[in-house]
Amino acid sequence: MISSSKKDYIVEYRPSAIRMVRVSSHTAPTTIEAVEEIELNGDTSAISNAVRKFCGAKANGYLNASCVVYPERRVVRQVAIDAPKGKETEFIFNFLHSEIEDAPQELSAHCLSPATGKEIDPKEFSRKEVLICGVPIPDIDELQKSMLEHAVYPKRVELGTVGMIGALQDALIWKGSKVPALFLELDERSANAVIIGSKGIEMSRKIDTGSMDIAEALKEELNLKDEEAAIRLLSSRDFDFSSIARKIIRKLLRELQSSIGYYEVQTGQSVSWIHTSSRAVPMDWLEGSIGGFLNLEPFEIDIEEWLKSGGITFANDSLSEEIDLSWIGLLSVLYVFNNEEAAA
């Protein structure tokens, strides 16, 4: 059975953890009443019990929530639709099949405006830039199966990458920044590099280097026993990576330098900020290292004040201390962005 709680919940399903937020309402004014993070350690029973305890569900109950997910094979890419009239949809699905390794025929696809994030009709955007979002349907089915095993019943599922981009754009506007930011999102074997400005997405690309590639480079550099040891070290907050960071992220740096350089030459605009997100293997040191090598400042905002501007507050001060910028993808579900075309 589904929990009959009158409260609303948002769950962020990350590769390494489940993050949960209980809110008074999905629409502003909203109060964040409780937050919790549960490690996905393989103990299904313990995880489901922790989820049920958080929402007050019975032994066979489910947490009914809006869910934010990051399937490994998701595609969120800005491209120009280059197809004859009437063939736009075919172009989009051909593009997704070319981008997704071992892509099945069944794909969920949407086209969004890079400026506003609103869904658009691809037939009206021929020869124009669009944000193509796609996920293999079997991957979503597999995620939903895992959620149910962990006592989470998804009443709606959203791509966290899309929400993160919208939140960062809004935060840039709120911050009053006239310069764009680099958003770097690492998966196990690839990365999304997105340059975001106050007017939306300026550029996006996929890089074929991920957290596991960095782990392999670290294993080789330090002659570690296996990749598991390298992953544990990458996640450490005590190890000093300053002397070896450039070596183990060499390929990633080269690709980012190329992308930023091309963008700056084409636009005459400098990228000044960076925000990184690595969910499968948390790497707190990565953002500072990349920022230092590329002369980019970590993107920072007062989360509590930014949320207040959207009508979202915390029930108490201790809750606000548990939230940092890494929660912004989850919190984007609550936020109503100023996404009018004129404002963008």
Image (tube, helix red, strand yellow):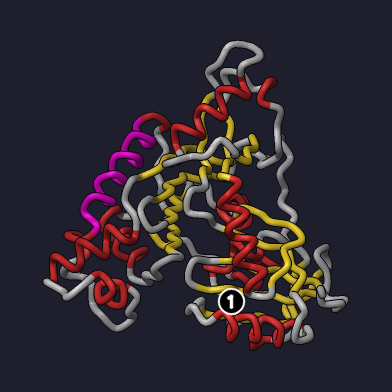
The secondary structure that most of the magenta stretch takes on is helix
Quadrant assignment, res 331: bottom right
The C terminus: image quadrant:
top right
Label 1: few (<14), some or many (≥20) within 10 Å?
some
Range drawn in magenta: 249-265
**In the rendering, at what x and y percent does residue 343 appear?**
70, 40
Q: Position of residue 7 (x, y in %)?
A: 83, 76
In the rendered image, residue 339, in percent from the top left (x then y), is placed at 71, 44
Q: Is 124 positioned to the left or the right of 198 in the image?
A: right
Is 154 positioned to the left or the right of 184 in the image?
right
Q: Amino acid at mark 1?
A: Ile
| Vertical comparison of 198 with 221: above or below | above
Residue lying furthest top: 84
Name the image quarter holding residue 340.
top right
**Residue on which disc 1 sits:** 323
Front residue of 293 and 251: 251
Residue 79 in magenta? no
Q: Secondary structure at mark 1?
A: loop
Q: Residue at x 60, y 74 (%)?
A: 19
Q: Is residue 325 above or below residue 139?
A: below
Question: Can you say which quadrant of the picture contains the N terminus?
Answer: bottom right
In the image, 101 versus 207, the foreground residue is: 101
Q: Position of residue 42 (x, y in %)?
A: 49, 78
Looking at the image, which is closer to me, 218 or 73? 73
- Which residue does the image show at 59% across and 39% down from the upper left? 107
Q: Quadrant of residue 27?
A: bottom right
Residue beneath the point at 75% across and 86% down? 59
